[in-house]
Each structure stands twice: as structure tokens, then as C-alpha cells.
Image: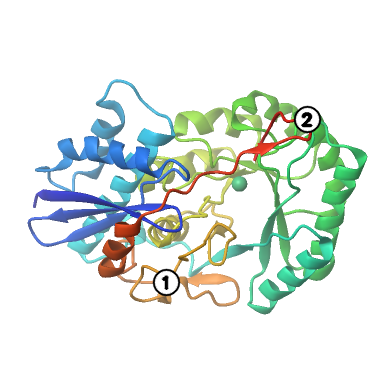
């Protein structure tokens, strides 16, 4: 079997899909994207495709080596995301060729269903309350929210109080049996994070995510020892090598993104690395159906898995949502806040190719917002 063609599709709301075709007629799908840089990743996929076309798609490990290392210069979000999407497509082809779901190829399932969480936004605690109540009604047992909007580097007393009010409102509605996770998005300095974490601890968050920006990973050991709150990070880390120091720092939850961190191949290895540090896996996935399908395959095959992010109804999803490009929504029909384990071969998701081709004709030009502080200076988004 040989790879004969690789195409990419720029589809709303902010995604990029790739389609890998073989001379056997088996087709694999992947989602190689950096949100806000989709066109750049598309160009990277085109360059990597020069090597892959003509190759045997089942030699996934060897292709991963060449794609990540063969260009001499390595790493970074663009290359790692391009490889990630292609890697997902190769696993999809392998599963379809062997007639098995990817989790079976990874050693077989270790759980029967996968816990997922829902995003809630809402600037006011009252509005937040309504959104959380809706998600509880829909069966979710955990929600995640941003702690705050643009925040002063050293949060004021009022900003700190606002974070606490939001999480307290969430805890009141969720009760002790459900979870709330809080995403700091790297908006606080380590000093501010330390102070807010101390006040958040009594509210028992499931975890606090990106307490500092990734380039300040060297500050994580101090934060870990300063708090009882489990700390999470990883959506902006792209390889085992980049996870090693944060795991050694003592983070509790590793959050690699299946579309950023080298795909199924590398995230499977990151999960094993995390296990040796007693850390659990909660893959980042505010993305589309192929990235989520890949994440679920990892979740079913990973012993130290905690919870899965998913993007149904997330605030980024304008003009299209998780189910816009799938033929059958079954893999994403969550029951009691859990995704069912499917036995369909490959990634287990059937892509609506006609819808994808039609959407690509319009494309998108999604960009991250640029935030400013009151004095006009750049603010972390
Ligand atoms: Mg995040």
C-alpha cells in the first residue's frame, strides 16, 4: 500500500483537516492545526507531503522520525502540529487496514467510557450559574472556565475577589460530587498566581491550568510546592522533551494536544512519561471532530487518564461546531458526561467529505484576539 495523495481543508470555525489517500482506496483523516495559524500549518503539511507521497502508510513510527527530525531543525508548534495531523491520519489508515480501532492497536482499552468536561464562560457569577446549571442538566460532571478576563500582572484585590466569586458560584451549583477546573491562561504572574491559588484551594478545583505562561515553566516547582491545588499545563508544549521539565516540576495534570504535540504517536509516549511522575493526562482539545476522535482513542488506551476537553458549544465555535463535518454523531453523544467507547476501525469518526470540501471553498481567517491593558500595553489573552 502506498500513499498517493495528501490534501488539506481550511474549514470554519478555525480548523484545518488533512486527508491522506492510498492506492488501496483506504483514506485517513487528521487535524493538523494551530489555532490562528492554520494557513501556516497548511504550508508545513504541503512540504511534509512531498516526503510521504509514495511511502507505505503503515510505517507510522518511521515516518514520525523522518517528519520530526529529517528537516534537521525541529520542534515548535507549526511543525509539531503538521506532523500531528498527518500522524492521526496514518493511525486512521492503520486502523482501517487492520479492521481495529486505534485504541486496540495501542494495546486495547483500559476503560469503558471517557469522562469529558464542558466549557462555561460568562463574565458575571449569575450568568455563569445559568450556564453551569445547563451543563449539569445535560449530564456533565465537570466544567472548566477561565478564571478572569484580561488581568493585571499582579491581580488587584478586586480582580482576585472576582476570580473567587466565579469559582465559588460554580462550586455552589456543582456541589461536592462534580468538578470545576480553572484555566488561568498564563494571564497571571507567578506571584499573583500564588496568591490566587491560596484563596482558591478551599473551593477544591479539579485543577488550575497554565498558572503561568509556558516560557516560565522554570517557576512551576515553586508554585507546585506553594499550593495543594493540582496544577496542569501542556497545551503549548509540543514533545516529550518539553513535558519532561514540567513533569519533574511536579505538575499533576499533563495536557498535550493531539493536534499540536506530534499526534497519537507522541501523546501516547507523553502519557507514559507522565505516568512515571504520577501525573494524569487531560488532553487539550478545543478543536474539531478528528482531533477529539484521536484524543478519545488515547483516552481509552491510557491508564493514567483523567478527563477529556471537548468543544461542543464552545465560545470559539462560530459558523460550525463539533458535529458539522461528521456523518454520524454517535462517537460524540455524551451520556452522563462520558463519551462511549466505539469499535469502529481507525479513529472511529466518519468525516462528511462533501461538507468538508464545501466548507474549504469559503475557508476562514480566524485569529486570536489581541488584548491590551488599560494603559495600552499588551495583555496575555
Ligand atoms: Mg487552556
Name the N-terminal-most of marks 2 and 1.
Answer: 1
Q: Residue at x 30, y 46 (%)?
A: 87
Compared to residue 109, the image places residue 78 above or below, namely above
Q: Is residue 253 above or below residue 212?
A: below
Residue 360 is situated, as x and y percent measured from the top left of the image, at 31, 57
- Number of the label disc, if any, that sits on residue 277: none
With 127 as the anchor, is 110 left or right in this view? left
Q: Is residue 186 visible?
A: no
Q: Which mark is residue 375?
A: 2
Few, some or many residues within 10 Å of mark 1 (<14, 14–19, 20+): many
Q: Is residue 298 visible?
A: yes
Image quadrant assignment for residue 63: top left
Q: What secondary structure is marked by label 1?
A: helix
Q: Quadrant of residue 109?
A: bottom left
Task: Report the residue marked by disc 1.
Answer: 331
Q: Is residue 74 above or below residue 298?
A: above
Report the front residue among 131 and 346: 131
Q: CA distance from mark 2 to mark 1?
A: 47 Å
Q: Residue at x 31, y 42 (%)?
A: 42
* Label 2 CA crowd tier, 10 Å (few <14, some 14–19, many 20+): few
Between 46 and 164, the one nearer to me in the picture: 46
The C terminus, quarter of image: top right
Side of 209 relative to 226 (left or right): left
**Dot 2: element:** loop
Can you tell me whether the CB of the residue at mark 1 lies under 8 Å from the nearest atom of ligand 1?
Answer: no
The x and y percentages for residue 245 are 57, 27
Residue for point 55% across, 40% down: 234
Amino acid at each position: 500500500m502506498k500513499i498517493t495523495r495528501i490534501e488539506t481543508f481550511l474549514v470554519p470555525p478555525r480548523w484545518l483537516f488533512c486527508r491522506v489517500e492510498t492506492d488501496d482506496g483506504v483514506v485517513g483523516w487528521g487535524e493538523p492545526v494551530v489555532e490562528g495559524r492554520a494557513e501556516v500549518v497548511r504550508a508545513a503539511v504541503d512540504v511534509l507531503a512531498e516526503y510521504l507521497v509514495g511511502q507505505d502508510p503503515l510505517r507510522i513510527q518511521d515516518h514520525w522520525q523522518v517528519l520530526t527530525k529529517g528537516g534537521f531543525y525541529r520542534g515548535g508548534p507549526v511543525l509539531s502540529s503538521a506532523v500531528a495531523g498527518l500522524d492521526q491520519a496514518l493511525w486512521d489508515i492503520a486502523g482501517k487496514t487492520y479492521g481495529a480501532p486505534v485504541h486496540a492497536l495501542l494495546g486495547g482499552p483500559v476503560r469503558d467510557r471517557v469522562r469529558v468536561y464542558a466549557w462555561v464562560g460568562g463574565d458575571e457569577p449569575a450568568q455563569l450559574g445559568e450556564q453551569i446549571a445547563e451543563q449539569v442538566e445535560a449530564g456533565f460532571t465537570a466544567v472548566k472556565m477561565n478564571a478572569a478576563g484580561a488581568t493585571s500582572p499582579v491581580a488587584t484585590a478586586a480582580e482576585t475577589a472576582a476570580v473567587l466569586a466565579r469559582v465559588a458560584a460554580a462550586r455552589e451549583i456543582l456541589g461536592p460530587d462534580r468538578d470545576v477546573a480553572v484555566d488561568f491562561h498564563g494571564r497571571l504572574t507567578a506571584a499573583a498566581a500564588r496568591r490566587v491559588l491560596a484563596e482558591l484551594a478551599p473551593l477544591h478545583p479539579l485543577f488550575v491550568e497554565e498558572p503561568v505562561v509556558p516560557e516560565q515553566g522554570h517557576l512551576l516547582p515553586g508554585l507546585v510546592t506553594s499550593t495543594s491545588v493540582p496544577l496542569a499545563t501542556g497545551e503549548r508544549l509540543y514533545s516529550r522533551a518539553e513535558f519532561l521539565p514540567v513533569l519533574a516540576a511536579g505538575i499533576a495534570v499533563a495536557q498535550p494536544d493531539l493536534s499540536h504535540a506530534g499526534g497519537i504517536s507522541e501523546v501516547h509516549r507523553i502519557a507514559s512519561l507522565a505516568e512515571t511522575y504520577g501525573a494524569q493526562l487531560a488532553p487539550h482539545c478545543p478543536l474539531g471532530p478528528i482531533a477529539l476522535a484521536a484524543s478519545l482513542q488515547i483516552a481509552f488506551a491510557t491508564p493514567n487518564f483523567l478527563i477529556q476537553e471537548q468543544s461542543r458549544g464552545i465560545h470559539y465555535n462560530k459558523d460550525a461546531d463539533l458535529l458539522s463535518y461528521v456523518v454520524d454523531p454517535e462517537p460524540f453523544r455524551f451520556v452522563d458526561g462520558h463519551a462511549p467507547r466505539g469499535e469502529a476501525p481507525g479513529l472511529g469518526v466518519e468525516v462528511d467529505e462533501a461538507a468538508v470540501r464545501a466548507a474549504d471553498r469559503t475557508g476562514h481567517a480566524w485569529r486570536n484576539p489581541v488584548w491590551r491593558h488599560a494603559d495600552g500595553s499588551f495583555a496575555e489573552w
